[in-house]
Image (tube, rainbow, N blue to C red):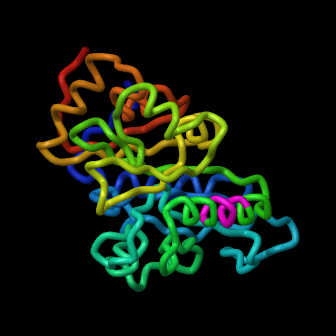
Amino acid sequence: MPQLIITNTPAQEAGEQINSIIQEHTGDVICLLSGGSALDVVEHIRPGKKCFHETCKQAVCEKSECRTIFMLGDERGSREPETNNYLQLLSRYPDHPILEHLIDTVPNVNESLKDFSIRIEENFFSILTALQNPKIIYVLGVGTDGHTAGIFPGESGWFRKTYQDDLTYVPITLHSLTIDSRASFTPTWILHNVDELIGYVVGAHKQEILTQLNTEDKQLNERPAEILKLHKRTTVYTDQQVEPT
């Protein structure tokens, strides 16, 4: 199990860790967010940072190239405000400073899930390549079935085909997601490109999956939340006691 922090204030402490990473990194930062309960963390994120440009004397840099970019790491293929993660974030935190640098992940009218995924990936990489020494953080929640972000458990053949190793951001269609189809970064891309994972797993209904993660190993297709254990630098925040191995 990665570093596990059990606290009465998991959202606040996760946000404070993200703030420290942003502040201490010499370069730009991309912070990928997850929907659902993981949006609790957003309230505590403060994207301001001291400038890393030698020629800038300001305490907080106003240069456009000195910044933290935010994006939902997985998205729901819907334009409905109650369903789309981006629109939920806007509704919940309408005055939050991260909105100034938040990538729009709302599908266009009549846009297919595949075309949406291609467009978001292209936009993401166009921004990423313009940044200086970018560091990538990803906030991940975990479902009771072991899914995380838009990475769902499934038969190994389906999993390999859906989350292909040579792809970055992919459409996900399952019979159980006919209304709530997703697009998501792939596990391989996350493991190879994300510098720090922040797990946010709260509530009594998540205690069992946390204990399972801590006491047994499974294949990634069986329980995608294994990515928290496979990644080289992960911190998990929870308000639940977890049984030891």
Residue 113 within the magenta-colored segment of the rendering = no
- How many numbered circles are shown? 0
114 or 182, which lies in front? 114
Q: Which of 151 and 18 is in front in this view?
A: 151
- Taking depth in this image into account, of 42 and 124 the one nearest to the observer is 124
Q: Where is residue 241 in the image (x, y as percent from the top left)?
A: 17, 33
Q: Overall secondary structure of the magenta stretch? A: helix
Residue 70 quadrant: bottom right
Q: In this rendering, would 226 be left or right of 52?
A: left
Query: What is the x, y in percent for residue 135?
Result: 66, 50
State the image quarter where residue 26 is shown. bottom right
Q: Is residue 16 above or below residue 59?
A: above
Look at 62% across and 47% down and name the residue there: 168
- The picture quadrant where one finds residue 222 is top left
Q: Dividing the image into 4 quarters, which one contains the N terminus?
A: top left
Q: Give the range drawn in magenta.
A: 120-125
Q: Which of 155/26 is in front?
A: 155
Q: Residue at x 67, y 66 (%)?
A: 123
Q: Position of residue 121 (x, y in %)?
A: 63, 59
- Give the image location of residue 240, x and y in percent: 18, 39
